[in-house]
Image (tube, grey):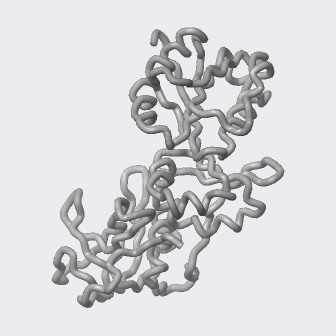
Amino acid sequence: MEKNVKAHIVTGFIEAGKTTYIQSLITNDFFHKREAGKTLILAFESGQVDYDEELLSEYKTKVVFREDEDIREFINEGIKDHDPDRIFIEYNAMTEGLWEVLTGMLDIAGITMLIDHSTLNLYYRNMPQKMRDMIAVADPVIINRAKEKEALDIYATPFRIMNTKALFLWESPMGYHEKIFGNPLPFDPSVSEIVLSDKDFPAWYVDALEFPGNYEGKIIDAHLQIKERPDRDGFMAGRMVMTCCMNDISFLGVEINAKDMKIQNDMFVHLKAKARVKEEGAGKRLVLDVIDMEAEPYPKDIVLSVLR
Protein backbone atom coordinates (compact mmCIF):
# COMPACT_ATOMS: atom_id res chain seq x y z
CA MET A 1 0.00 0.00 0.00
CA GLU A 2 1.69 3.17 -1.17
CA LYS A 3 -0.11 5.62 1.10
CA ASN A 4 -0.97 5.18 4.75
CA VAL A 5 -4.72 4.55 4.74
CA LYS A 6 -6.43 4.61 8.12
CA ALA A 7 -9.07 1.95 8.71
CA HIS A 8 -11.91 2.04 11.21
CA ILE A 9 -13.57 -1.21 12.26
CA VAL A 10 -17.27 -1.30 13.11
CA THR A 11 -17.98 -4.60 14.83
CA GLY A 12 -20.78 -6.39 16.62
CA PHE A 13 -22.99 -9.42 16.34
CA ILE A 14 -25.32 -9.88 13.39
CA GLU A 15 -28.11 -7.27 13.01
CA ALA A 16 -26.51 -4.90 15.55
CA GLY A 17 -26.96 -1.92 13.21
CA LYS A 18 -23.49 -1.75 11.69
CA THR A 19 -24.63 -0.93 8.14
CA THR A 20 -26.92 1.87 9.31
CA TYR A 21 -24.22 3.29 11.57
CA ILE A 22 -21.54 3.40 8.86
CA GLN A 23 -23.84 4.90 6.22
CA SER A 24 -25.22 7.52 8.63
CA LEU A 25 -21.71 8.54 9.62
CA ILE A 26 -20.42 8.94 6.07
CA THR A 27 -23.47 10.87 4.85
CA ASN A 28 -23.39 13.22 7.83
CA ASP A 29 -22.57 16.68 6.51
CA PHE A 30 -20.07 17.38 9.27
CA PHE A 31 -18.12 14.20 8.54
CA HIS A 32 -18.24 14.77 4.78
CA LYS A 33 -16.93 18.35 5.00
CA ARG A 34 -14.20 17.43 7.48
CA GLU A 35 -13.02 14.19 5.86
CA ALA A 36 -12.12 15.03 2.29
CA GLY A 37 -11.32 12.38 -0.29
CA LYS A 38 -12.66 8.92 -1.03
CA THR A 39 -14.00 6.28 1.34
CA LEU A 40 -14.01 2.52 0.89
CA ILE A 41 -16.38 0.25 2.82
CA LEU A 42 -15.26 -3.36 3.11
CA ALA A 43 -18.36 -5.36 4.05
CA PHE A 44 -17.83 -8.84 5.42
CA GLU A 45 -21.52 -9.57 5.88
CA SER A 46 -24.87 -8.64 4.37
CA GLY A 47 -27.56 -7.80 6.92
CA GLN A 48 -31.21 -6.89 6.74
CA VAL A 49 -30.39 -3.28 5.86
CA ASP A 50 -28.70 -2.61 2.50
CA TYR A 51 -26.28 0.18 1.75
CA ASP A 52 -27.70 2.91 -0.48
CA GLU A 53 -24.84 2.71 -2.94
CA GLU A 54 -26.27 5.46 -5.16
CA LEU A 55 -26.40 7.85 -2.22
CA LEU A 56 -22.94 6.85 -1.02
CA SER A 57 -21.47 7.47 -4.47
CA GLU A 58 -22.37 11.14 -4.01
CA TYR A 59 -20.01 11.10 -1.03
CA LYS A 60 -17.20 9.45 -3.02
CA THR A 61 -17.81 6.17 -1.21
CA LYS A 62 -17.71 2.66 -2.65
CA VAL A 63 -18.99 -0.50 -1.00
CA VAL A 64 -17.46 -3.88 -1.81
CA PHE A 65 -18.82 -7.15 -0.43
CA ARG A 66 -16.68 -10.16 0.23
CA GLU A 67 -17.96 -13.35 -1.38
CA ASP A 68 -15.68 -16.38 -1.62
CA GLU A 69 -12.30 -14.87 -2.33
CA ASP A 70 -9.36 -14.91 0.07
CA ILE A 71 -9.59 -12.19 2.74
CA ARG A 72 -6.23 -10.67 1.85
CA GLU A 73 -7.01 -10.71 -1.84
CA PHE A 74 -10.40 -9.09 -1.18
CA ILE A 75 -8.82 -6.26 0.83
CA ASN A 76 -5.99 -5.65 -1.63
CA GLU A 77 -8.31 -5.62 -4.65
CA GLY A 78 -10.72 -3.19 -2.97
CA ILE A 79 -7.93 -0.78 -2.12
CA LYS A 80 -6.34 -1.09 -5.56
CA ASP A 81 -9.61 -0.44 -7.42
CA HIS A 82 -10.84 2.50 -5.35
CA ASP A 83 -7.60 4.09 -4.03
CA PRO A 84 -9.33 5.28 -0.83
CA ASP A 85 -8.28 7.92 1.66
CA ARG A 86 -9.97 6.00 4.47
CA ILE A 87 -11.55 2.59 5.00
CA PHE A 88 -14.54 1.45 7.04
CA ILE A 89 -14.82 -2.24 7.80
CA GLU A 90 -18.12 -3.90 8.65
CA TYR A 91 -16.89 -6.76 10.76
CA ASN A 92 -18.95 -9.63 12.10
CA ALA A 93 -16.98 -11.08 14.98
CA MET A 94 -18.20 -14.57 14.11
CA THR A 95 -16.00 -14.66 10.98
CA GLU A 96 -13.09 -16.89 11.97
CA GLY A 97 -9.58 -15.58 11.32
CA LEU A 98 -10.75 -12.16 10.13
CA TRP A 99 -9.47 -10.17 13.11
CA GLU A 100 -5.89 -11.37 12.71
CA VAL A 101 -5.87 -10.49 9.00
CA LEU A 102 -7.39 -7.04 9.48
CA THR A 103 -5.01 -5.99 12.25
CA GLY A 104 -2.04 -7.48 10.39
CA MET A 105 -2.72 -5.77 7.05
CA LEU A 106 -4.29 -2.42 7.90
CA ASP A 107 -3.52 0.62 10.03
CA ILE A 108 -6.46 0.44 12.47
CA ALA A 109 -7.38 3.95 13.64
CA GLY A 110 -10.33 2.96 15.80
CA ILE A 111 -12.81 0.25 16.68
CA THR A 112 -16.50 0.85 17.36
CA MET A 113 -18.69 -1.91 18.77
CA LEU A 114 -22.46 -1.84 18.35
CA ILE A 115 -24.74 -3.88 20.62
CA ASP A 116 -28.43 -4.50 20.03
CA HIS A 117 -30.12 -4.39 23.44
CA SER A 118 -32.88 -6.75 22.28
CA THR A 119 -30.33 -9.56 21.81
CA LEU A 120 -27.74 -8.44 24.36
CA ASN A 121 -28.74 -10.86 27.12
CA LEU A 122 -28.84 -13.78 24.68
CA TYR A 123 -25.27 -13.21 23.48
CA TYR A 124 -24.02 -12.25 26.96
CA ARG A 125 -25.27 -15.53 28.41
CA ASN A 126 -24.41 -17.86 25.53
CA MET A 127 -21.32 -16.28 23.90
CA PRO A 128 -19.66 -14.34 26.75
CA GLN A 129 -16.09 -14.87 25.51
CA LYS A 130 -16.89 -13.46 22.06
CA MET A 131 -18.59 -10.46 23.64
CA ARG A 132 -15.68 -9.93 26.00
CA ASP A 133 -13.16 -10.08 23.15
CA MET A 134 -15.00 -7.39 21.19
CA ILE A 135 -15.60 -5.07 24.14
CA ALA A 136 -11.96 -5.39 25.24
CA VAL A 137 -10.64 -3.75 22.05
CA ALA A 138 -13.45 -1.29 21.27
CA ASP A 139 -13.82 2.41 21.95
CA PRO A 140 -16.61 3.45 21.88
CA VAL A 141 -19.16 0.74 22.69
CA ILE A 142 -22.64 1.84 21.61
CA ILE A 143 -25.76 0.05 22.86
CA ASN A 144 -28.85 0.72 20.77
CA ARG A 145 -32.54 -0.28 20.78
CA ALA A 146 -32.94 0.14 24.53
CA LYS A 147 -35.92 2.34 25.43
CA GLU A 148 -34.27 3.64 28.60
CA LYS A 149 -30.59 3.82 29.50
CA GLU A 150 -31.34 2.64 33.05
CA ALA A 151 -32.07 -0.79 31.58
CA LEU A 152 -28.34 -1.10 30.89
CA ASP A 153 -27.13 -0.57 34.47
CA ILE A 154 -26.88 -4.31 35.15
CA TYR A 155 -24.03 -4.50 32.62
CA ALA A 156 -22.05 -1.62 34.15
CA THR A 157 -19.62 -3.62 36.29
CA PRO A 158 -18.82 -6.52 33.91
CA PHE A 159 -18.46 -4.28 30.86
CA ARG A 160 -16.24 -1.76 32.65
CA ILE A 161 -14.02 -4.58 33.92
CA MET A 162 -13.76 -5.96 30.37
CA ASN A 163 -12.56 -2.54 29.18
CA THR A 164 -11.71 0.11 31.77
CA LYS A 165 -10.87 2.75 29.14
CA ALA A 166 -13.78 2.48 26.70
CA LEU A 167 -16.53 5.07 26.35
CA PHE A 168 -19.89 3.33 26.78
CA LEU A 169 -22.81 5.05 25.07
CA TRP A 170 -26.56 4.60 24.86
CA GLU A 171 -28.20 5.42 21.54
CA SER A 172 -31.64 6.72 22.40
CA PRO A 173 -34.75 6.01 20.29
CA MET A 174 -34.39 9.63 19.08
CA GLY A 175 -30.90 8.91 17.77
CA TYR A 176 -28.74 10.94 20.14
CA HIS A 177 -25.90 9.35 22.12
CA GLU A 178 -25.48 9.64 25.88
CA LYS A 179 -22.77 8.34 28.19
CA ILE A 180 -23.80 5.48 30.47
CA PHE A 181 -22.34 3.58 33.44
CA GLY A 182 -21.56 6.78 35.34
CA ASN A 183 -21.84 5.55 38.93
CA PRO A 184 -24.24 2.62 39.43
CA LEU A 185 -22.86 1.43 42.77
CA PRO A 186 -24.44 -1.24 45.03
CA PHE A 187 -23.13 0.50 48.16
CA ASP A 188 -23.18 4.02 49.59
CA PRO A 189 -19.91 5.74 48.56
CA SER A 190 -20.60 8.83 50.67
CA VAL A 191 -20.08 7.23 54.10
CA SER A 192 -16.74 7.51 55.89
CA GLU A 193 -16.39 3.74 56.35
CA ILE A 194 -17.34 1.52 53.40
CA VAL A 195 -18.01 -2.13 54.21
CA LEU A 196 -17.74 -4.17 51.02
CA SER A 197 -19.53 -7.47 50.59
CA ASP A 198 -18.27 -9.96 48.01
CA LYS A 199 -20.86 -8.78 45.47
CA ASP A 200 -19.85 -5.14 46.09
CA PHE A 201 -16.13 -5.60 45.41
CA PRO A 202 -16.08 -5.69 41.55
CA ALA A 203 -18.14 -2.50 41.31
CA TRP A 204 -15.97 -0.78 43.95
CA TYR A 205 -12.77 -1.83 42.18
CA VAL A 206 -13.86 -0.39 38.82
CA ASP A 207 -15.08 2.85 40.40
CA ALA A 208 -11.91 3.23 42.47
CA LEU A 209 -9.84 2.68 39.34
CA GLU A 210 -11.71 5.41 37.46
CA PHE A 211 -12.37 7.83 40.33
CA PRO A 212 -9.73 7.22 43.05
CA GLY A 213 -10.28 10.67 44.54
CA ASN A 214 -13.79 9.68 45.61
CA TYR A 215 -12.29 7.36 48.21
CA GLU A 216 -9.50 9.56 49.58
CA GLY A 217 -9.35 9.22 53.37
CA LYS A 218 -12.17 6.67 53.61
CA ILE A 219 -11.99 3.43 55.54
CA ILE A 220 -12.40 0.29 53.43
CA ASP A 221 -13.53 -2.87 55.23
CA ALA A 222 -13.47 -6.04 53.13
CA HIS A 223 -12.57 -9.74 52.94
CA LEU A 224 -9.79 -9.97 50.37
CA GLN A 225 -7.02 -12.15 49.00
CA ILE A 226 -3.38 -11.05 49.14
CA LYS A 227 -1.14 -11.33 46.07
CA GLU A 228 2.47 -10.36 45.44
CA ARG A 229 2.75 -7.47 42.99
CA PRO A 230 3.84 -8.78 39.57
CA ASP A 231 5.72 -5.62 38.60
CA ARG A 232 7.63 -4.71 41.76
CA ASP A 233 8.11 -5.54 45.44
CA GLY A 234 5.05 -5.35 47.62
CA PHE A 235 1.55 -6.75 47.82
CA MET A 236 -1.94 -6.16 46.50
CA ALA A 237 -5.32 -6.93 48.05
CA GLY A 238 -8.24 -7.93 45.89
CA ARG A 239 -10.28 -10.82 44.55
CA MET A 240 -10.27 -13.25 41.66
CA VAL A 241 -13.11 -12.15 39.38
CA MET A 242 -14.76 -13.87 36.43
CA THR A 243 -16.19 -11.33 33.99
CA CYS A 244 -17.61 -13.68 31.39
CA CYS A 245 -16.43 -17.30 31.56
CA MET A 246 -13.86 -19.67 33.06
CA ASN A 247 -11.28 -18.56 30.49
CA ASP A 248 -11.48 -14.97 31.70
CA ILE A 249 -10.66 -15.00 35.41
CA SER A 250 -8.39 -12.19 36.62
CA PHE A 251 -7.10 -10.95 39.93
CA LEU A 252 -8.38 -7.42 40.49
CA GLY A 253 -6.51 -5.72 43.29
CA VAL A 254 -5.05 -2.49 44.65
CA GLU A 255 -1.70 -1.84 46.29
CA ILE A 256 -1.58 -2.14 50.06
CA ASN A 257 0.84 -0.59 52.55
CA ALA A 258 1.11 -2.93 55.53
CA LYS A 259 4.35 -2.14 57.33
CA ASP A 260 5.43 -4.43 60.18
CA MET A 261 2.67 -6.92 59.37
CA LYS A 262 3.30 -10.53 58.43
CA ILE A 263 2.02 -11.13 54.92
CA GLN A 264 2.11 -14.24 52.78
CA ASN A 265 1.23 -14.56 49.13
CA ASP A 266 -2.29 -15.92 48.53
CA MET A 267 -3.41 -15.58 52.13
CA PHE A 268 -7.02 -14.57 52.67
CA VAL A 269 -7.71 -11.77 55.14
CA HIS A 270 -10.30 -9.55 56.73
CA LEU A 271 -8.77 -6.16 56.01
CA LYS A 272 -9.53 -2.69 57.28
CA ALA A 273 -7.55 0.11 55.64
CA LYS A 274 -7.54 3.83 54.94
CA ALA A 275 -7.62 4.76 51.26
CA ARG A 276 -5.02 7.13 49.89
CA VAL A 277 -4.56 8.56 46.39
CA LYS A 278 -1.06 8.12 44.98
CA GLU A 279 0.32 10.08 42.04
CA GLU A 280 1.86 7.83 39.40
CA GLY A 281 3.15 9.39 36.19
CA ALA A 282 0.33 11.35 34.61
CA GLY A 283 -2.34 9.44 36.52
CA LYS A 284 -3.55 8.62 40.00
CA ARG A 285 -4.35 5.35 41.72
CA LEU A 286 -5.62 4.20 45.07
CA VAL A 287 -3.44 2.69 47.80
CA LEU A 288 -4.79 1.09 50.96
CA ASP A 289 -2.87 1.87 54.17
CA VAL A 290 -3.71 -1.13 56.34
CA ILE A 291 -5.09 -0.41 59.81
CA ASP A 292 -5.91 -3.96 60.79
CA MET A 293 -5.61 -7.32 59.02
CA GLU A 294 -6.55 -10.78 60.25
CA ALA A 295 -5.98 -14.05 58.40
CA GLU A 296 -9.12 -16.01 57.53
CA PRO A 297 -9.93 -19.39 55.97
CA TYR A 298 -10.54 -19.37 52.24
CA PRO A 299 -14.20 -18.72 51.41
CA LYS A 300 -16.29 -21.30 49.62
CA ASP A 301 -16.47 -19.07 46.54
CA ILE A 302 -12.91 -17.82 46.02
CA VAL A 303 -13.77 -16.55 42.51
CA LEU A 304 -16.38 -13.81 42.25
CA SER A 305 -18.64 -13.66 39.21
CA VAL A 306 -20.13 -10.48 37.79
CA LEU A 307 -22.55 -12.44 35.61
CA ARG A 308 -26.15 -11.78 36.54
**Left or right: 185 in relation to 169:** left
Up the image or down, 302 lies above or below 244; here it is below
Q: How many marks?
A: 0
Q: Position of residue 21 (x, y in %)?
A: 70, 38
Closer to the camera, 251 or 247?
A: 247
Q: Is residue 98 above or below residue 237?
A: above
Q: Quadrant of the C terminus?
A: bottom right
Residue 204: x %, y % from top left? 48, 73
Q: Position of residue 301 (x, y in %)?
A: 35, 81
Name the quadrant containing residue 22. top right
Residue lying farthest to the front in this orientation: 68
Which is more toward the observer, 147 or 264? 147
Q: Looking at the image, which residue is at 47% across and 68% down?
A: 208
The front one of 18 and 212 is: 18
Q: Residue at x 64, y 49 (%)?
A: 142
Residue furthest right in the image: 174
In front of the other: 78 or 198: 78
* Quadrant assignment, res 154: bottom right
The residue positioned 58% from the left and 41% from the top of the image is: 112
Image coordinates for residue 277, horizontal then vertical, percent: 42, 67
298 over 157 or under it: above or below: below
